[in-house]
Amino acid sequence: MEDSINSFLGSHRLLVILVGGFIIIGPFVIPSIKDYFSSDSKLRRKKSREKRNYELKQQIQEKLMLTKETENRRKIERQKIQEQRQRIKDGEHQKYLDLRKQIEKMPIYQRWKQEIMNKCGSKCQMCGSSNNLQVHHLDSFYSIIKQYNITSIEKAFECKQLWNVDNGEILCKNCHDKMESSINRQTLMYNT
């Protein structure tokens, strides 16, 4: 019996209370340090840590998945918006190209072009060449169309800036292609 008491006392701590002259050894068992470091206890703590770590990893993965899904949704939305803007731009640019072709067929455009040729002496104002000559608006044709909100040949006819002889010059095709307005026009034509 003494061995079992010693064994019990060795692995547990008892709470001893003195009450009214009586000593009470209570059933209050406190695990000893030995129990804390026992292999079973270490295994339970390890499993508990692993469970917490696993749960934390799961939470982090869920948040990452939500973040990726959110980012993917945003990316898709940005692509849709960009595609929509491009469709609008393409449609507007095509309208501009169609309007420009109509304006260039107008008799007033042909008259304006002839007046520029007469004014400039039928030679390129940049290099002096007389081959492949083209009329160039100093204030670009496109900017005039946008600035004066020209959407029809009737509005074009009424726009004095479009037919201003002082706003034109003669350039050969090579020099004309080097002008910023021509580069922009070529870029827009190839992107549509």
Image (spheres, helix red, strand yellow):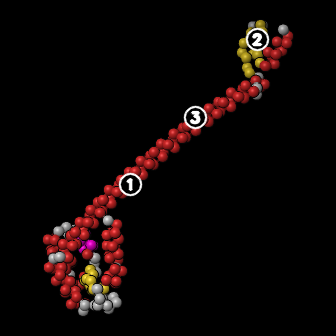
| Quarter of the image with the N terminus in it | top right
Label 2 crowd (10 A; few <14 / some 14-19 / many >=20): few
Numbered tag placed on residue 102 in the rendering: none
At 45% from the left and 45% from the top, the residue drawn is 69
Q: Nearer the viewer, residue 184 or 42?
A: 184
Q: Is residue 177 above or below residue 2?
A: below
Q: Position of residue 6 (x, y in %)?
A: 83, 15
At 76% from the left and 24% from the top, the residue drawn is 35
Q: Nearer the viewer, residue 181 or 4?
A: 181
Q: Is 20 positioned to the left or the right of 112 in the image?
A: right
At 73% from the left and 25% from the top, the residue drawn is 40
Which segment is the magenta one? 142-146
Nearest to the eye among marks 2 and 1: give it.
1
Q: Which residue is mark 1?
A: 79
Nearest to the eye among marks 1 and 3: give it.
1
Judged from the image, the secondary structure of the residue bearing numbered disc 1 is helix
CB within 8 Å, label 1 to label 3: no
Q: Nearer the viewer, residue 182 or 29?
A: 182
- The amino acid beneath tag 2 is Ile
Whole-number angstrom distance, CA of label 1 to CA of label 3: 36 Å
Q: Which residue is mark 3?
A: 55
Q: Position of residue 5 (x, y in %)?
A: 82, 12
User: Can residue 91 be found in the magenta stretch?
Assistant: no
